[in-house]
Image (tube, rainbow, N blue to C red):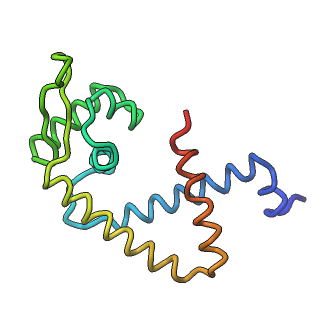
Amino acid sequence: MPTVESVCRTNSGLASELRTGVMRLRRRLAAERHPDNPLSMGAMAVLGQLARNGELTIGELARAERVQPPSMTRTVNWLEEERYVARRPHETDGRQVVVTLSDKGSKTLLADRRRRDAWLTQKLADLTPAERETLRAAAPILDRLAAAD
């Protein structure tokens, strides 16, 4: 009978373990969101894209978040109505608009990140130094996996 350790040594076993752990951590971090934050995780992801990458078109946002442009248009419309983002015409393509993060959007994003980072920092302190080093080494790999096509 295979042990958990032997199953994790295979790629499919590792994939299963990672999927489970990452999804559970994502749900836990989502639970740590600021209680006054009315934004969905999808809307927060849009604010995060704008914070990381600067101004983006709706098409660029849709590709980055792996959603269809009409869905992104609805999200951006709501974010603009609520003043989390602003739009302006594209400098060279009159058919497009460029979306930018507003002060309200930036403040909301930072407050939400601070709260979740504080929870995670506290939990990381409970780990051994070796465990934290393992996670430090794994973080860019996980980021690269998340960005893969």
Q: Position of residue 64 (x, y in %)?
A: 39, 36
Q: Quadrant of residue 53?
A: top left
Quarter of the image with the C terminus is top right
Q: Position of residue 24 (x, y in %)?
A: 52, 60
Left or right: where does residue 22 sit relative to residue 82?
right
Q: Name the residue at 26% across, 30% down.
A: 57
At which x and y percent is residue 83? 10, 47
Q: Which image quarter is the N terminus in? A: bottom right
Name the spot of residue 121 as percent of width and height, x first.
44, 75
- Position of 121 with respect to 8 (left or right) is left
Q: Is 147 rendered above or below residue 106?
A: above
Residue 7's quadrant in the figure?
A: bottom right
Q: Residue furthest right?
A: 1
In the rendered image, the vertical position of residue 114 relative to residue 48, given as above or below: below
Q: Residue at x 23, y 52 (%)?
A: 39
Count of residue discs = 0
Q: Residue at x 72, y 53 (%)?
A: 14
Image quarter of residue 17: bottom right
Tell me if 28 is positioned left or right of 39 in this view: right
Looking at this view, name the residue that lies furthest to the front: 92
Q: Is residue 69 above or below residue 14?
A: above
